[in-house]
Amino acid sequence: MFVRMITFLKANIASLAASLSDFLMTVLLVQWCRLAVVTAAAAGTVTGGIINFLIGRHWVFQAGDEKAVRQLWKYALVWTGNLFLNTGGVYVFTSQAGLHYTVSKVLTSVLVAFLYNYPLQKNFVFSNNW
């Protein structure tokens, strides 16, 4: 039980690091580069995805002994869903609900991290069962 809680905590720290890089990239691209919000959100998600994979593989799930290519393919599959969920969530919360894009980005990131990313990374990407 304790090990599961530590893994969950570490996964959330990794998710936070990835989300911060994602968020910063999104804001930078919107504010400085004047990219469209959805395009910037997608680029931020790519940045966060790379960081999250590396931290998850080596620190959270300590799965560095497994073949990186196999994990990368599984992560890419999960991450593609993550990209659509994050981009779609930002679109819905910004365009349809009228929230500011930064609020939309944070809200979407938190929902996707807890309900989608952690369970799939733990049980599929970094698991030896697949």
Image (cartoon, grey):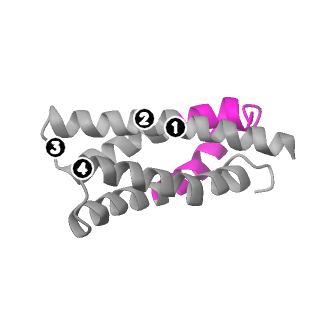
Secondary structure category for the residue under label 4 = helix
Residue indicated by mark 4: 39
Q: Mark 4 touching mark 1, by CB under 8 A? A: no
Point 85% across, 41% down: residue: 2
Q: Nearer the viewer, mark 3 or mark 1?
A: 1
* Circle nearer the viewer, 4 or 1: 1
Magenta segment main secondary structure: helix
Dot 2 amino acid type: Leu
Q: Nearer the viewer, mark 4 or mark 2?
A: 2
Q: CA distance from mark 1 to mark 2?
A: 6 Å
How far from the left and from the top, in percent, is residue 6? 76, 38
> As shown in the figure, which amino acid type bears the numbered disc 3?
Leu
> Residue tagged by mark 1?
16
Q: Distance between the Cα atoms at labels 3 and 1? A: 24 Å
Q: CA distance from mark 3 to mark 2?
A: 19 Å
Tell me the kind of residue under disc 4.
Thr
Q: Residues within 10 Å of mark 3 (few under 14, many from 20)?
A: some
Q: Name the element at disc 3.
A: loop
Residue found 45% across the figure and 40% down from its top? 19
- Between the C-alphas of marks 4 and 3, the distance is 7 Å
Q: Residue at x 32, y 54 (%)?
A: 104
Please give the label number shown on residue 35. 3
* Residues marked 1 and 2 touching at CB (< 8 Å): yes
Instruction: Pick out the residue farthest to the bottom.
Output: 96
Q: Secondary structure at mark 2?
A: helix
**First of labels 3, 1 by sequence position:** 1
Q: State the residue at coordinates (41%, 33%).
A: 21
Q: Which residues are magenta?
A: 51-80
